[in-house]
Structure formats: C-alpha cells, structure tokens
Amino acid sequence: KRDLSQKSQGNAIKTYKYNPITFLPLNLFEQFKRAANFYFLVLLILQAIPEISTLSWYTTLVPLLLVLGITAVKDLVDDIARHRMDNEVNNRTCDVIKDGRFVSTKWKDIKVGDVVRLKKNTFVPADILLLSSSEPNSLCYVETAELDGETNLKFKMALEVTHRHLQEESALADFDGLVECEEPNNRLDKFTGMLSWRDSLYPLDADKILLRGCKIRNTDFCHGMVIFAGADTKIMRNSGRTRFKRTKIDSLMNYMVYTVTWGFGMALCALQIIVVLILLSAGLAIGHTYWEQQIGNSSWYLYDAQDSSPAYRGFLTFWGYIIVLNTMVPISLYVSVEVIRFGQSYFINWDLQMYYPEKDTAAKARTTTLNEQLGQIQYIFSDKTGTLTQNIMTFKKCCINGQRYGKLCKGGGGGGILIPAGGQVHTSSLSSNGKFLFYDHYLIEQIKAGKEPEIQKFFFLLAICHTVMADTSDGQLHYQAASPDEGALVTAARNFGYVFLSRTQNTITISEMGVQRTYDVLAILDFNSDRKRMSVIVRESGGHIRLYCKGADTVIYERLHPIGLVLSNLSNVFANETLRTLCLCYRDISQDEFEVWNKKFLEASLATSHRDEALDKVYEEIEKNLILLGATAIEDKLQDGVPETISRLSKADIKIWVLTGDKKETAENIGFSCELLTEDTAICYGEDTRQVKKKKKKKLKLKFPRTAEEKKKQSEKRRRAEAYKEQQQKNFVDLACECRAVICCRVTPKQKAMVVELVKKYKKAITLAIGDGANDVNMIKTAHIGVGISGQEGMQAVMSSDYSFGQFRYLQRLLLVHGRWSYIRMCKFLRYFFYKNFAFTLVHIWYSFFNGFSAQTAYEDWFITVYNVLYSSLPVLLVGLFDQDVSDKLSLRFPRLYVLGQRDLLFNYKKFFLSLLHGAVTSLIIFFIPYGAYLVSMGQDGEGPADYQSFAVTAASSLIFVVNFQIGLDTSYWTFVNAFSVFGSIALYFGLTFDFHSAGIHVLFPSVFQFTGAAPNALRQPYLWLTMILTIAICLLPVVAQRFLSMTIWPSESDKVSEIWYLGECGRCLFTGAGGGCPCTWQGWDEMGIKVPSNPSHFGIL
C-alpha cells in the first residue's frame, strides 16, 4: 500500500493544438485574431455589398486566401509533427510494479505513486524520486540535454535509507512511504519535499529527483517513485510561451500601418489619430456628395432608378474608397517581412566565419524576428567569466598562513625556485595529473617536509570541501565538477598529494600523501550566489569535529575570528593580476555545539516552505569565528580576439558594460586586458562619484497606522521614498551613460538584469546582453536581444538566448555584418514597399476628379489583385534578402558605418513621408501624362485610343516599368537573380495581361474578365509606347540625377567606403589611386577613419 500526497495524475502529454475536426475553425480563429488578417476580412465583407463596392470581391479574397493558406499549411505541418512526437513519447515503455512484480507499461499509463525501474540509455518518463540504483551508494548518472542542452553527465544520489532497504523487487513492491512536497512548478534546479517512512522523516531536494526528459547514463538500472506526471512535470511546466520580443522597426512599422490604414473609424482603432486614409476617403466622399448635388441629379442619363439623397450616396462612396484605397498597405507586406527575416536567420546559421571548430559549434539564430535590431544596438552588457574569458581555470598561486607561493614569488627565508616554462611539478601522489603545472618548487619541498601543518590543512581543505564526483575508468581517476573553479581546486590538491578518491552519502575518502583515509561527512552547507561560500562539517580521526569553508573574500572576512589572520592586501594583489581569489578557513566545533546546531539543521532541512531561507539562517549560526588558512589564485585567460572585438565595437559607437561578480581590482584589470580600459582612460570609481549621503542606522520598528491621518502620512512617505529611489536610479544611469565603458563588479544575477532594465527604462536604448551561464539567463531575457555563448558552464544561457555561437569574438560579425546588413535591407525593403503601393494606389484619387468621385478604379480588377503578389514582389524580396551596400570585410574594417542603425537614419517618420511623397509624385505622373496624351490623339488605324480600358492598360504598364526600374536603382549588390527578377516581373506582367484580356478566357468567365482585347489593341499603338517611355523617363530621371548629385557632392559614409572597394588596396595605405601608382600623400583621416587624399577630386569621393 502506498500513501500519496496528491491525486493521481495521468502521464500522457499533449503538445499539439489541433485535431481533424478543430483544425480549420481553430486555425482560422487564431489567424483572424491578428489585426491585419481581421482588417482584410472586414474589407472582404464590405466588398460583398454591391451598394458600397466598385471593386470585385476577388481582389481581396485571392491575396487573403494565399496568406491564410500559407500560414495554415505551415501550422498543419508543425502540428502533424507534434502529433507524431506525442504519440512516440506517450507509447514508450518502462517497467512498473503491478501486483508485486515489474510489468512493461506505456508511459501514458503511468500514474503518480507508481514505482518504476529504468534501464541504461532510456529516458525518464516522469519526475521521479530516486530510491536505489545498481551503482554503489545508489548513484545515478543522467544526461540533461533535453532540459538545458548540456551533454555532460550529472549525478543524483538516493537517500541512504532507501538505498539500503529498497534494492529487491519485493521490497519495492511493499514500499509504503509518504511524500509531502511542493506544488508542481517550473524550477528545474529546485525541489522541496519530505519522505515519511518507517516512523522517520527524510528531507528531499533536487539531488534526489530524476526529471522527465533526462536520460540514464553509466547506470545499469535504477528504481524510483513517480512524484509528478504528465503536465505537472517540470519540463512540461517549462514549455509555456517565452517572452515575446519585437524590434524597433517592427513597432515603428506597426504604428505607421495604423497611421495609414487603421483610422477608418472602426472600433478597433477608435483611439488612433485622424489618419491619412480616413481623410482621403472622407474628402472624396464629400466631393461625390457635392458632385451629385451639382451634376448627378441634373444628368438624366446617369439615373440608376434609386432615389437616394446625395448625402447617402456620399456615405456609401466613403466605404467604397475605403475598399479601393486599401492597397496602400497590402496583406503581402507582413508575409514578405517574415520571409526576409527567415532568410536572414539562415544566413547567420550558414556563416562559416562564425563557426567554432574546437567545439563543433555553429552560430545559431534561435529567433527570426529580431535580425534587423542587431543593426541598432547601442549598449552591450557582457558577463566576464566564460564570456570574455575561457572559463578554463588554472591553479596559479596561493597564499598559506601569510606566505605567497607561485610564479615569481620567493619562499620565506629559503629562496624560491622558479621552474622553467614548460616544466612539470611531480608530487608524491601516484594519481597526479600530468597536465598540471605550478611554477614554485619551494611549496613542493614544504609539503614533502611535512613541517608546516597549515599547508597540510590548506590542501586537505581543497580535497574535502567540494561537491565533485570521482569516477575511475581504465585505471584513471576522473573528476566531474559542477563548476570549473571546483575542478581546478580539487585537481590542484590532487597534484600536491591530497587526492580525493570517492564519496558516499555520509563519507568521503581521501589519499593524504599516499595514506588513504575515510572521513564522516556530517553536513554539507551548499554554495549559492547569495552566500558566495560553501562549507563541509566532517568528523576527523580522534572524533573531533571541524568545519571547513571556502568562499569569496568579502563574505569570509565578515566571519573571521577577531584575532585571526587577515589577507586583505594579498587578495588585492591577486586581483590586480586578474586572478580569481577564494579564501579558505576552518573552525573546530565541540560535540555539544554540533548536536544543538544539527537539531536546527535537520528541522530546517525538513521545512516544506521557505526551506532555503531557513537553511541559510542555520548556516549563519555555525559559519562564524573562522580561522583563515590562506587563499587560492586561479587564472582564467581571455578568449582569442576579445580585445580586437571590443575595440571594433567601441569604434561603432556601441557602449560596452561588463557585469561581473568579481571584486573591483580583478574586474578593472580584466578591463585593461581586453582593452575596454586603456592607459588614457580616466577611471571614475563608484565610491568617488556617490553624492555625500548621511546614513543613519535606525532600529527596525514595526509601527502599524491606526488613524486615517497616519495612513496618509505613511502613504506619502512611501511615495517620497519611491520617488527618491527612482531619481537615484536615473542619476546612476545618466552618470554611467556618460562614460565610454562601465564595469559593474560584485553584482548578483538579479542585479545584472536590473542594470539592463534601468538602461532600457531611462535611456530608451536598444540593448544586447551576452553570457554563457545560468547566472546570465535573467540578464539575457531582459535585454532586447540576448546572446548565449556555448561555454564551459552548460547550455542554459544558449537555451534562453535569441542568438548563440561559440566565442565572444563572433559578436562583431553578428552586429557589424549581419546586423547592419539586415537593418539596411529591411529599411530599404519597407521604404520601397510603401513607395510602390502609394504610387499604385493614389492613381485612384487623381482618377476620382474625372469620374465624379464615384470610387471607380483606375485599373483592371485582376491587375489590382496580382500587383503585389506577382508583378512587384520578387525584386524587392530579393533586395531584402541579398542586398549589400559594402562587403563584409569593409563593414568590419570601418565600424563607423554601424551608426546608421543606431540613429534610425534609414527608416523613420521622415523617410516614411518621403516615400509617401515620392509615391504620390509618381502616381501623378503615371496618371496625368497618359491622360494628357489621350486628350487629342488618333491611332494609326484612324480610331481614338482614348477609352477607359486602353488608359488603364497604359497606366498599369507604365507603373510596372517604373516600380521595377526603381528597385533596380535602389539595388546596391547586383546578381543574376536580381536582374532576372526585375525583367522577369515585367515579362510576367505582359504575359498574364494578354491572357486576362484574351477572348478565350472571356468566353469561359464573361463576368470576371471584361477587358477583352484591351491590351492587344492598346499595345500595338506606337503612340502609347511613346507615352509610356515619356512617363518612365519623367519618373526616373530626377531620381537618377538626385542619386548622382548625392554621391558626388554629399556622399554618405557607405559611399566613401564603396569607393575604396572600387579603387582597390595597396600594401602601404588603404587604397590606390586611379591611373597608376599609390598616392601616399594624405592630409589625414576624416571623422569615420578614412584617409583623405591631397587631391580629393582625383578620387571623386569628397
């Protein structure tokens, strides 16, 4: 019989969204929740009303169906894959005890409380309490790649009591323990529970839980009891939606779309300002009302048998123009943007110059929505360890009892011996690691002499105070450490003769200078980012109890015995050498003191709520009056290319902040090492810039307000305190942002995220956070863009990031090349897209002045239907994917080119309205030149070609030529594909137009294709071709002239750099002059870092 702490929960999972019945209605419902789709659905409904629409319903239906269909197919494919994955997972099998024996059972049939047996290389089906395993001490090794992306093995260990009594099948069948634990949650690294069994209570934590999604490794079998199943498991609780990030351009574009499109008076946009389209539609509707009053009522031949008032007709016309002018921002805009972003993401993934061969790690764009924002970064927030440095720790120096040991240090009184570079220290330990190097033989002599008990205690502490696991394979001893620091310290102790061999739940075995001893571990006081230390309490030979502790100097000094050794100056010396320092200390504990403390420790361990806080409080009681042994100094080298990357990013006007938990001296020296700080940098320390504050220590008084006046005073006090806090935050940000670089030291993971949030809040700047460990996840998620590095601390940062790669140096290419290109491409795409649609749509407005403002269209309905889908979409799409103003090498050589995105120079309200103006002028030319040409004309057959259909064909043909040639002028990087798309779009237009205007298709669909013979008749007239040529020339020649003058007289920075590429390079200077020889006569450098020649006209760039 098993007593359960919660109701049985099925283990089947469901990640799919649809089934055959719900797919169509549910998918359509989700798609129409998007504002753009819903808007076009409303337009389609309006077009179905004959009294309103002069435009055929299929002009909106065809593009809408295309967009809905593409999205639906994508969603269907994704959901089918989820169905298959769910079926595959739910039908996996494992052994479950039923009727006293293990029976193979499908995962979906497992219930909470079931006892299961898992075998090697199988996945864990649910969140399970480990009861026992085939390994000594019931260790169980698991791989957590599906949880956090890490492939290194982690170990779990069962309770000693279950390890001892629950090995046999019969004992497992009779297991009747009661588990009381926390509610299901998504915290992978936390678990709080308690096992009640055989009249005893046992604390449970995350080290005793096997999470669903883990894989059993190096363990033949293990047994466990299901705690959480199905949707309650931690991996399923983590499968919720992530925080949605939107680019600055995206927000600006949406606002512009609202400004242009959503101001129709619809309830959806009631709060939007009076916008372009409603003004145009209202103005044209008023014009129709006036025209009806003055002309329509008196023209008997226009009578339609409906005696409607002019005002009512004007109202209907208003909605008619809403439909006709909807193509200002067509639905294809959103699809095109997503295609461009998708393609740009793959370019990042395929970039071999961001591939890290040592770890077989390629760059990965984990999102497709933020690419252009990579070209607008103003602030970078970087972790130090593992991000700027390699996070491969090397034991370099130490200080024991006030004596320093290590390279270039002299032994006390005896003169140190410096081992030559490449030399190797050999100790008496048979298990020494041949890769370990230490450059001070004097310490080895001291250890061998055995005359310094403090040295013995020092290395004994390193060998016993840790959570490392030892594994012996092929006669070799291997360590598996939770952090590189611990691995380096235990390896150092091993090479100095104190070898950690193995551990159980309650013991640890060490070889001390060849003598093997086993010690009882009475308690382990865990490390966390708040405590910044860990301790272990052991019973040594002779029965006396001792606490060993290691941690950051700041927390250790606060807990030292008043008469103990203090090494504050030494830790600063190590920090100045960019070495990471840990202080080591110990204290003896009497049996009585331990028994009193251990009782409190067990009570805190069994707490079901706020266990961490209770344990921290208990830890504080025992970690006091410590005796300092010394300090370790570990080196963490910079990654390759870090100084060059930071220098280049700084030249791009990107401000770099380093956020680290190291002390000030270490952080400052790392700043100099990576060239974030230079000798010319004026350094302002935080304590120097603080305003004088009077801090008064007051006793905490809990005073509850009783009267209304007291409540008001307390509320006002809180408001003033909040306002003061906000002002202090703003002052900090204002001061820090005045600096070229900022280094924040001694910061916790939460404070890292707070710093990022402050800059976002007060500077409205685009931020990027980059890190490699779990302590950087919060910062990465807070920034506009998060970048993860696949480092030594696992994959948590990568799993939470938007982009990832193997080394910090690849950040310069991600921003200065891919980010800049993506920004330029997207801006060029949007400007041109708005231009071509204004040029297309506004022709209807000019035509309205000649048709009584009746909302009649200026083009054929089928031309309106496929204009954005076929005739003008491919060239601009290719520009958005492939265009380059300069090459990747020049983008890196001249980082100042990056400032375009930071200053929003390529897409803003000014550029938007210039596109609108350009489109309006183009539409005027496209309408009025053919109109003027048609006023007095005669075809070669003696007939006048000035009918409506011929005019529509002429205007449409002119438009296709103009917009496709315009994108040709806008293209900076020509390929065969670009040329084919431009001329292919024109050819496609004429091919489809002749088909739509053929007699055959009119016979089949007489009501849909009504322009029978219009194109063949019109386009055989040379007069109309001359008209189109004139129209095209007037539209494009001013653009060509403006571009020429701009590049000649007011060249942009990219124009200057492009000239460098055109002229080539030489060995002495950046480029050679035209017409022979290298003109190495320079006047200096301009503001962007380009050499200025003595004869600017010779180069034509200034």
Image (cartoon, helix red, strand yellow):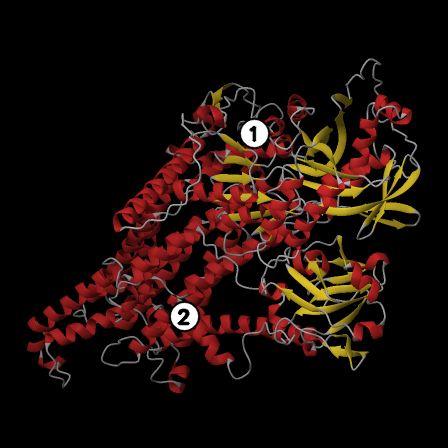
Q: Is mark 1 on a helix, strand or loop?
A: loop
What residue would you read off at disc 1? 676
Picture coordinates of residue 400, whole percent (x, y)? 76, 25
Q: 181 above or below 1062?
A: below
Q: 590 above or below 1025?
A: above
Asked if residue 166 lies left or right of residue 598, the reply is right
Q: Which image quarter is the C terminus in?
A: top left
Picture coordinates of residue 714, whole percent (x, y)? 32, 45
Picture coordinates of residue 179, whole percent (x, y)? 67, 67
Res 923 seen here: yes
Picture coordinates of residue 459, whole percent (x, y)? 81, 33
Residue at point 14%, 84% (across, down): 306
Amino acid residing under circle 1: Leu
Residue at point 86%, 40% (across, down): 541
Nearest the eye: 55 or 804: 804
Q: Which image quarter is the N terminus in?
A: bottom right
Q: Residue 856 carries which label?
A: none
Amino acid residing under circle 2: Lys
What residue would you read off at disc 2? 33
Residue at point 54%, 49% (across, down): 778
- Residue 592 location, quadrant: top right
The count of marks equals 2
